Amino acid sequence: MIRTATIKRQTAETDISAKLDIDGTGKSEIVTGIGFFDHMLILLTKHGFFDLQLNTDGDLAVDGHHTVEDTGIVLGQALTKALGDKNGIKRYGTAYVPMDEALAMVSLDISGRPFLIFDAVIPAERIGNFDTELTEEFLRALAVHAGLTLHVRVLSGKNSHHIVEAIFKALGRALDEATAKDNRIVGVMSTKGML
């Protein structure tokens, strides 16, 4: 089964196109207009072994909020579409990632029940032209539109770049684990028979 999705989303605030291959090798072509955010998405795909082509044209003259949040929406929709009926996936994924003094944990369930717990302090308000409070907004949009129960905790860290980078790397690794196929699973990993 080919697990790919192409999503196009256009609003008065953003124009986004994305092509996602869950069973990729970590290759990406990403342009959002926010350099640090591009870097984080590249790390997510690299550590998640996803291939992603993403172009986001947002109203950056206002600020980065719509660009970052709507990118999370589109990536969530792409994950949902690419996973299809979710047959055979492991469903759960957890990853701890250290980045020098920072340590982030991401644990998730592709449950169909969107929920975000974000327990992180990011000291700097900005990293480059990225507003760090948008980290949580991206994760919330992704969780809602991919149907993820998503827990993100930063266990240590002082450097804001390191903290956010550890989060995105851990997210990629947890998604890789959760979306992986397991031949022992017949149907979906749920006694309900659906996710």
Image (tube, rainbow, N blue to C red):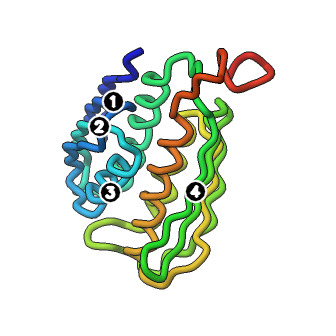
Distance Cα–Cα, label 2 vs label 1: 5 Å
Does residue 26 lie above or below 164 as drawn? above
Q: Which residue is mark 3?
A: 64
Distance Cα–Cα, label 3 vs label 2: 24 Å
Percent x, y of residue 95: 56, 56
Q: Residues within 10 Å of mark 3 (few under 14, many from 20)?
A: some
Amino acid type for the residue under numbered disc 3? Gly
Front residue of this view, candidates 47 and 74: 47
Distance Cα–Cα, label 4 vs label 1: 21 Å
| Contact check, label 3 and label 4, Cβ < 8 Å | no
Image point 31% across, 23% down: which residue? 6
- Mark seen at residue 189: none
Nearer the N terminus, badge 2 or badge 1? 1
Nearer the N terminus, badge 3 or badge 2? 2
Image point 43% across, 23% down: which residue? 82
Q: Quadrant of the C terminus?
A: top right
Q: Quadrant of the N terminus?
A: top left
| Contact check, label 2 and label 1, Cβ < 8 Å | yes
Q: Residues within 10 Å of mark 1 (few under 14, many from 20)?
A: many
Does residue 131 lie above or below 60 as drawn? below
Compared across the picture, whether 142 is left or right of 58 comes to right
Q: Residues within 10 Å of mark 2 (few under 14, many from 20)?
A: many
Is label 1 in a helix, a strand or a loop? Answer: strand
Q: Which residue is mark 1?
A: 21
Q: Which residue is mark 2?
A: 51
Distance Cα–Cα, label 3 vs label 4: 24 Å
Between circles 3 and 4, the one closer to the viewer is 4
Compared across the picture, whether 94 is left or right of 32 comes to right
Compared across the picture, whether 138 is left or right of 14 comes to right
- Mark seen at residue 106: 4
